Amino acid sequence: MSSAIRFSSYGDPDVLGLDDVPDPVPGAGQVLVRVRAAGVNLADSKRRRGLWSGGKDLSAPTGVGFDLAGVVEAVGEGVASPAVGDEVFGTGTHTYAELALSTPAQLALRPAEVPWEVAGGVGVAGRTAYRVLRQLEVGPGDTLLIHAAAGGVGIIATQLAIAWGASVVGTAGPDNQAFVRELGATPVRYGDGLAERVRAAAPDGVDAVLDASGRGELGVSVELAGGPERVITIAASDAKEHGVRFSDSDKGVDVTDAFPELGRRLAAGDVVLPVWRTYPLAEAAEAHRASENGHLRGKIVLLP
């Protein structure tokens, strides 16, 4: 038996509880990971609240969590790499647990220079940032506008785009202007007058836009980019109204090197992922409350 955070009904963070559960067994093509760290994402809260349930009630207790870093405990049939004993990071299934299942495509080897809590917080945000930058075809000489540059995806996307040779203008609130500058971007405040501030920060224009905010910036983003072709949102519900792509999957994008590259860049210091706070696994409900309060500068990570 091992411990895992589960919930039996949708609701506020108090529905989360620590249960004793049978150890997962890896099937063909699967990897069993002993979790050392598991990042908390807003996607976890959406799952807990039932926003992806389609109105169906739970028929049995279920786990939560996608991010993980840990040590390979066992592998299923057909898995040649990673091997038992390897230290890995990436994503998996129901990762708020002592043991969680994943697949080789969702994992990369953890560089020794990357702390467990950092590796455990990269998963969803890192893969999303990598995917969208590939979809936008960001490269040397581009000027990229990122909305919510101080958020989970924005932090990684800002640094990764700069590492790929782009210049970044990042929107953020007043309290995060200095932080966005530390990431290497030119910070601008969101709100009224945004277009004028972006033009002042990028007098030669904006080539592409990543909207990780969803606060109504798509219209001005299309205007600044000269059309919707290189504007992508991961947060706005009105994407279709503006002819903008909504990115919510890896379909059609080669993300094979997402975690290996992020591991290399974290180890080299090209990308830094701040950790706002760690919590013991049993305090997952408190971690969710903190995450949902927002305005955090870095990841929340659970330590089983």
Image: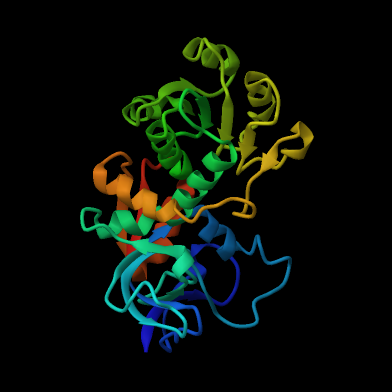
**Looking at the image, how many numbered discs can be counted on the residues?**
0
Residue 302's place in the image compared with 181, above or below, is below
Residue, x 53% and y 47% (percent of image)?
131
Which quarter of the rendering shows the C terminus?
A: bottom left
Which quarter of the rendering shows the N terminus?
A: bottom left
* Residue 120 place in picture, x, y as percent: 35, 59
In the picture, measured across the screen, residue 252 lies left or right of residue 171, that is right
* Residue 200 place in picture, x, y as percent: 50, 10
Residue 67 found in image quarter: bottom left
- Furthest residue in direction left, as rendered: 113
* Residue 95 place in picture, x, y as percent: 43, 69
Residue 32 seen by the camera: yes
Residue 38 found in image quarter: bottom left
Residue 3's place in the image compared with 259, above or below, is below
Residue 140's place in the image compared with 248, above or below, is above
Residue, x 31% and y 69% (percent of image)?
70
* Residue 41 place in picture, x, y as percent: 47, 55
Residue 161 found in image quarter: top left
The front one of 186 and 253 is 253
Residue 36 seen by the camera: no
Residue, x 31% and y 28% (percent of image)?
182
Q: Specify the color scheme.
A: rainbow
The front one of 189 and 211 is 211
